[in-house]
Image (spheres, rainbow, N blue to C red):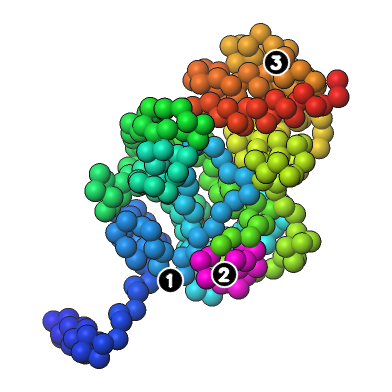
């Protein structure tokens, strides 16, 4: 009772003084609790109910080439506890400290040619680094856009929009359950982040008051320690930046959309098809490579990549399908990403037979 009175008196004094109340910090006790919070707002990651304004210590970030998710806009943020930072690695995800939260909100606008007009949040996913490892949680937004609630078993949401090419789309959007999160976020059987690799973060970002390379900004803000100057650090190409080399863009796209499973420690390791940008062996990249297991997924084709001939390449066939028994990636999309398929097909066509 005495503590409550002190708090009330303090607030009254603050109001009388005319001083603005300091924004509340992130609730580290909630972040590290064994039981997930039932509501997104419980973590204190944002200052507003609509999760547009991050709390102190929560920093927006973006990726050079992200995973395609049915044309959804993704708003990403990172939180690391005071005095703790991620360790730099030139390859693979950074080594994040306990207490890290990676936030990703998926949103759609009525017309994705103007994605900021009438945008509505659909879900917010959290990856939380706890002492025992990473935990993946999905929070679904209410119709009023004032709160997102935990959905550990996933959900299906009906979403309609105009896509960037001007075509109307109506999809059954998948909010993944925790097992589905593990399917993609898996390395040697452990749950791990996918996107925030140093090379995928090596880009400028407009922070509103300044534009700065993200690796530099993360070091300045305490999210990252170590690593070279950005000019000397590896960098993933931007898949749709036509000023960059075609092969680099296609390899970046396959890295973001396929390599989380197609790597030696991933869920598709037995396929022998490894699509990370670090891979250099032609057969493991799919060039002239026959599938380990034939079936509907092969489309009657012989090799993953037939140089010079995308129409004879299993990779293009599977990317161009939305049949659950054929499509790749298996999760994360319901639509065919026509622009991504065209990029990979163009890359294959330019390969020397």
The x, y position of residue 280, in whole percent, is 81, 37
Q: Say which mark, if any, is on residue 210.
A: 2
| Residue lying at 49% horizontally and 54% vertically, measured from the top left | 76
- Residue interval drawn in magenta: 207-221
Instruction: Between residue 339 and residue 221, name the one nearer to us.
Output: 339
Residue at x 51%, y 66% (from the top left corner): 208
Q: Which quadrant would residue 138 be assigned to in this image?
A: top left
Q: Quadrant of residue 264?
A: top right
Image point 51% across, 21% down: which residue?
A: 322
Quarter holding the N terminus?
bottom left
Question: Which residue is identified by label 3?
Answer: 311
Mark 3–mark 2 Cα distance, whole angstroms, equals 46 Å
Quick one: quadrant of the C terminus? top right
Q: Is residue 312 above or below residue 215?
A: above
Q: Is residue 14 left or right of residue 208?
A: left
Which residue position is annotated with label 1? 56
Q: In this view of the protein, can residue 135 be seen by the observer?
A: no
User: Which label lies toward us, 3 or 1?
Assistant: 3
Q: Position of residue 319 (x, y in %)?
A: 60, 24
Q: Secondary structure at mark 2?
A: loop
State yes or no: residue 220 in magenta.
Answer: yes
């Amino acid at each position: 009772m005495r503590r409550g009175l002190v708090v009330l008196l303090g607030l009254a004094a603050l109001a009388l003084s005319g001083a603005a109340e300091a924004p509340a910090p992130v609730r580290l006790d909630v972040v590290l609790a064994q039981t997930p919070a039932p509501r997104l707002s419980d973590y204190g990651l944002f200052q507003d109910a609509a999760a547009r304004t991050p709390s102190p210590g929560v920093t927006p970030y973006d990726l050079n080439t992200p995973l395609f998710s049915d044309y959804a806009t993704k708003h990403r943020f990172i939180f690391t506890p005071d005095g703790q930072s991620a360790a730099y690695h030139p390859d693979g995800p950074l080594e994040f400290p306990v207490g890290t939260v990676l936030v990703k909100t998926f949103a759609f606008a009525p017309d994705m040619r103007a994605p900021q007009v009438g945008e509505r949040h659909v879900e917010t996913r959290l990856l939380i680094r706890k002492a025992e490892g990473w935990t993946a949680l999905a929070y679904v937004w209410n119709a009023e856009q004032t709160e997102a609630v935990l959905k550990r078993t996933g959900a299906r949401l009906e979403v309609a929009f105009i896509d960037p090419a001007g075509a109307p789309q109506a999809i059954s959007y998948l909010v993944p359950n925790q097992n589905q999160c593990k399917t993609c976020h898996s390395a040697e059987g452990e749950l791990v982040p996918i996107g925030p690799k140093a090379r995928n973060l090596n880009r400028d970002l407009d922070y509103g008051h300044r534009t700065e390379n993200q690796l530099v900004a993360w070091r300045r803000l305490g999210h990252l320690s170590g690593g070279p100057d950005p000019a000397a650090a590896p960098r993933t190409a931007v898949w749709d930046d036509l000023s960059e080399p075609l092969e680099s863009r296609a390899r970046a796209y396959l890295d973001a959309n396929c390599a989380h499973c197609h790597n030696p420690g991933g869920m598709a390791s037995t396929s022998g098809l490894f699509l990370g940008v670090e891979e250099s062996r032609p057969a493991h990249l799919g060039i002239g490579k026959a599938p380990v297991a034939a079936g509907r997924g092969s489309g009657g084709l012989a090799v993953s990549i037939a140089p010079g001939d995308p129409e004879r390449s299993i990779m293009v066939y599977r990317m161009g399908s939305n049949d659950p028994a054929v499509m790749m990636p298996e999760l994360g999309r319901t639509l065919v990403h026509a622009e991504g398929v065209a990029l990979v097909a163009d890359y294959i066509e330019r390969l020397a037979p």
